[in-house]
Image (cartoon, grey):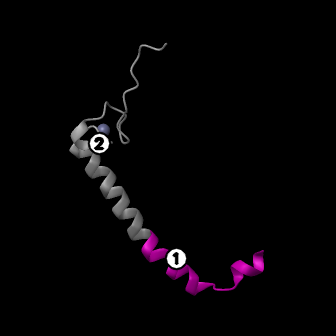
Amino acid sequence: MNKTSKEPSCAMCERPVEVDYKPFCSKRCADQDLGKWFNGSYAIAGEPADQAESNPYSDKNAE
Ligand SMILES: [Zn+2]
């Protein structure tokens, strides 16, 4: 059997996870991930609508 206990690692920096900040090692990493998600959803919310309006049919013609 493997004696090494499989510790979860921080999703941001892969350091050992702190229970309080699961699945991250610290508040800093948790905040970084939050910021990433916030920026991501912000971009997704803005872009598709813009693209859909610029060429509504060309995408279907390509297929
Ligand atoms: Zn971390």
Of helix, strand and loop, which one carries label 1?
helix
Label 1 belongs to which residue?
48
- Compute the Cα span from label 2 to label 1: 32 Å
Q: Is the CB–ligand 1 distance for label 2 below 8 Å? A: no
Is 40 rendered above or below residue 51? above
- Residue at 30% from the left image edge and 41% from the top image edge: 24
Q: Quadrant of ligand 1?
A: top left
The stretch in magenta equals 44-63
Residue at mark 1: C-beta within 8 A of ligand 1? no
Residue 1 screen position, x and y as percent: 49, 13
> Under tag 2, what secondary structure?
loop
Mark 2 vs mark 1: in front: 2
Is 60 contained in the magenta span?
Answer: yes
- Which quadrant would residue 12 be assigned to in this image? top left
Q: Tell me where residue 19 appears, x and y as whole percent.
A: 25, 37
Residue highlighted by disc 2: 22
Q: Quadrant of the C terminus?
A: bottom right
Inspect the image, locate mark 1, and give the three-letter code of the amino acid beneath it.
Pro
